[in-house]
Amino acid sequence: MNAETENRKNRHLVRAGALLLAVLVVAFVVPRVMPVPAFLEDYGFYPKRSAENAQEWASLPIKYVDHSICRDCHQDNYGVWEKSRHSTISCESCHGPGQAHLEQGASLEIDTSRESCGVCHAQLPSRPKGFPQVDLAAHGNSAACVSCHNPHAPQIGKSPRIPHRLEGHSQCLLCHGEGGIKPIPSDHRAQGQDTCLSCHKK
Amino acid sequence: MKVSRRQFIKIGGKNLLGAIIIWSAFPSLLQGVSSPEAVRKVSPAPTPTQRGHYWRFIVDIRKCIGCGKCVKACKLENDVPLEPEYNRTWVERYVITENEEILVDSPNAGIDGFTADYMNIKYRNLDIRKSFFVPKLCNHCDKPPCVPVCPVGATYATKEGVILVDRKGCIGCRYCVQACPYGARFLDPRLKVVDKCTWCYHRITKGLPPACVEVCPVGARVFGDLRDPESAVSKIIREETVGILKPEIGCENKVYYVGLEEGVR
């Protein structure tokens, strides 16, 4: 081998190395920069159309109103609710969206079933520890929760926290029947079916 | 210097092999390559993002009771199909057993709560270490992977950073549905266009909170503006430990979670 062919060989190697480097740079840098230009992340392809479209989204009608508007007509319940432990709950959370009610006077159906209260208050291991929960199967003898607990100003515990303004005989026995809390004494059997509250106040 | 082609490849190959062995032998070196920024962003400072977006959504996992009222309100407010597979927001239940199994479910996307018997049968005999609810929604990422993949430019970020879909432009190809790392998009079966959480754009632009925030009974969802230092979101970000879902992806989510457990994806 003479010096000239040696030189050419070396230059060839340098060229090959440089080419390899260039390919590597292109292979790593270009895919990162090219397919995701910054302006695409910002506004997509058509910024003009998107501004117009954002306006369309912004002009959609609302269905859940601001709950402070409920006060205008329902001062009584609003005043009670405002001071209660349930005051963190917006009216529409239980009563449903209010816009149609406001505009057309559509009636708002309220679900007063045990299951409806249980959605929040039935015992579940996944709920936060301090949150008021109750075993629905063992509590209240399948009476509607709202017959003892006022949903606008809920209280838990014993009388007088739970107001005892119940009608008739059977409602009382739901809790105070045989085997219940403070069960009805056996000598009361002879008592009539009129309201317990005629003797027991509150 | 005399180097034959054969020698060049030999020496180069050996060096490359050596480098790979040394590199993989020291995991700390490898860690240096994966961006440390992703780790730091777990607790984002209360500053606007680079693009000047100030709206933030905070989900407090410690407060959520899994009542599903948010899911219902979202569907009613935004006219989302009521079938359980179409959701702009949904609630997941995480159950971590003493065997360190992580069970995740979301019956009917959580819209009926989690109290029905059939939802709880399989957990009755489990040794539960801990369990909690994780409400999910679009994270309105500052670097949204769903936006650049759209072939027709029908999804975009507004100047406030809300990711929206132009229903007139969307061709329903579902690339964005696949691109979203959080499963926050779906194809509306009636309109055949992609739908997603808009943070109730029609409400927040009028100064009202998103419907899910309005109805949340325990304040587990909070929405607000970072520019106001007294806003609820500013306070929470300043005072609590907040995290984002999948920070390693680097989407720079604008939905923050309080009480985020490792393992929540």
Image (spheres, coloured by chain):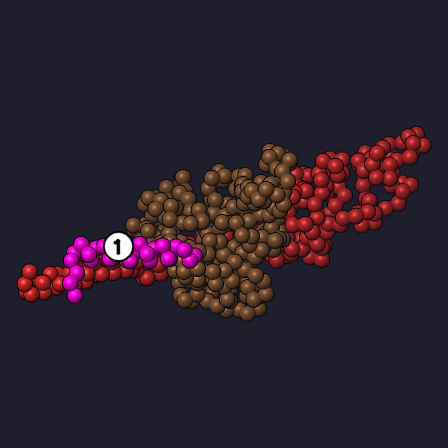
Chain colours: A red, B brown
x and y percentages locating residue B71 in the rendered image: 53, 46
Residue B161 placement, left or right of B65: left
Q: Foreground: A54 or B180?
A: B180
Instruction: Write down the chain letter for disc 1.
Output: B
- Report if residue B20 lies within the magenta region: yes
x and y percentages locating residue B85 in the rendered image: 47, 39
Q: How many marks?
A: 1
**Outermost residue, top direction?**
A190
**Can the viewer see residue A201?**
yes
Q: Foreground: B35 or A183?
A: B35
- Report if residue A28 lies within the magenta region: no
Query: Magenta region's main secondary structure?
Result: helix
What span is in magenta?
B1-27
Residue A35 placement, left or right of B101: left
Q: Taking B63 as reference, is A121 above or below it?
A: above
Q: Which residue is mark 1?
A: B13
Residue B17 placement, left or right of B98: left
**Outermost residue, right direction?**
A187
**Outermost residue, front direction?**
A1
Q: Residue at x 75, y 41 (%)?
A: A147
Q: Residue at x 87, y 36 (%)?
A: A183
Question: Quick one: label 1, few (<14), some, or many (20+) residues within 10 Å?
Answer: few
Which amino acid type is marked by label 1? Gly
SS under mark 1: helix
Q: Residue at x 81, y 38 (%)?
A: A175
**Can the viewer see residue A79?**
no
x and y percentages locating residue B87 in the rendered image: 48, 44
Q: State the image quarter where residue A31 is shown.
A: bottom left
Q: Foreground: A200 or B30?
A: B30
Q: Residue at x 22, y 61 (%)?
A: A21
